[in-house]
Amino acid sequence: MPKILIKTQKEIERIRDCGALVAETLARAGEMCKPGVTTQEIDNFVKEFTLKNGAIPACLGYNGFPKSVCTSVNEVVTHGIPSSYVLKNSDIINVDITSILNGYHADSSETFFVGEPKPNASELVAVSRECLFEGIRVCGLSNARFSDIGAIISGITEEHGFSVVRDYCGHGIGRSFHENPLVLHYRQMLPGPKIEQGMVFTIEPMINEGIHKTRLLADKWTAVTADGKLSAQWEHTIAITPHGVEILTLAR
Ligand code: MF3
Ligand code: CO
Ligand code: CO
């Protein structure tokens, strides 16, 4: 298992500062998710607001990604590209924002309802949110291991007859956007590495209404559910501190 970087308190402070900006950007982007708005307009806002606050939109140009934010609507699992698509009543949209402030990354996403949600969508979004917060909670327990995250998330998801995406996962984060470890959201056979003080990583479960399988569109970014049913995701960047687990992507 390649090395998991341990961050100093100072580094965690930097990521927290970036996280506060990401949280504010995400809340404002969420306010924009109304019928009639295009995903490109959300991208425009995220790019301008991030730059205005002295930060860099990490997605822009990352491995060739063409926009500043990921906007994943309905059956899009992750990495949706902002476009001229016009949001309509009862869509669900995940807005995933990563910024770089003073050299450090923070990464967070939420799934928003556009207008009035359909009952199945509202259950799926609630379950994916619960998966994130339960995943975070188990990281704060003594002797926690990375495999505990997938175990709790799989249990919650199965109770509702939904499925956990396996093709994308959470990740360590800091000076780099994506670093060790891989944070798997599904149940594993073997115990993972121990979760230790100074580790900073994301938890970002993608929960599907139907089967867990995904399919990549021709643009090589947009991942959709193989069965065309809905997918929802929530993400925070967290740190393991001497006081327990802390969410770094919170507004101040
Ligand atoms: N924010 C995504 C994540 O949670 C990664 C997006 S990479 C991009 O890890 F290139 F699509 F922007
Ligand atoms: Co993200
Ligand atoms: Co992430």
Image (cartoon, rainbow, N blue to C red):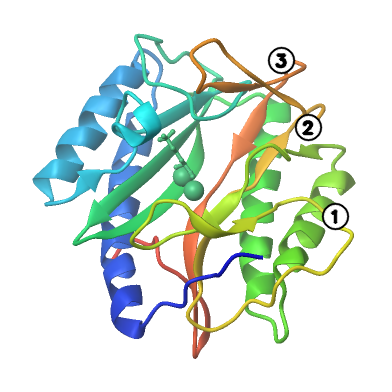
Q: Quadrant of residue 212?
A: top right
Say what amino acid the circle numbered 3 marks.
Gly
Between discs 1 and 3, the one toward the N terminus: 1
Say what amino acid the circle numbered 1 marks.
Gly
The reply, left or right, for residue 132 in relation to residue 220 is: right
Is there a contact, CB below 8 Å, between mark 2 and mark 3?
no
Near mark 2 (Cα within 10 A), the count class, few <14, some 14-19 or many ≥20, is: some
The percent coordinates of residue 70 (x first, y second) are: 42, 31
Label 2 belongs to which residue? 212
Q: Secondary structure at mark 3?
A: loop
The quadrant of the picture occupied by the N terminus is bottom right
Residue drawn at x 32%, y 30% is: 32
Q: Disc number at residue 155?
A: 1
Between discs 2 and 1, the one toward the N terminus: 1
Marks 1/3: CA distance? 23 Å
Label 3 belongs to which residue? 228
Q: Residue furthest bottom?
A: 242
Q: Is residue 132 visible?
A: yes
Q: Secondary structure at mark 1?
A: helix
Q: Quadrant of residue 193?
A: bottom right
Marks 2/1: CA distance? 14 Å
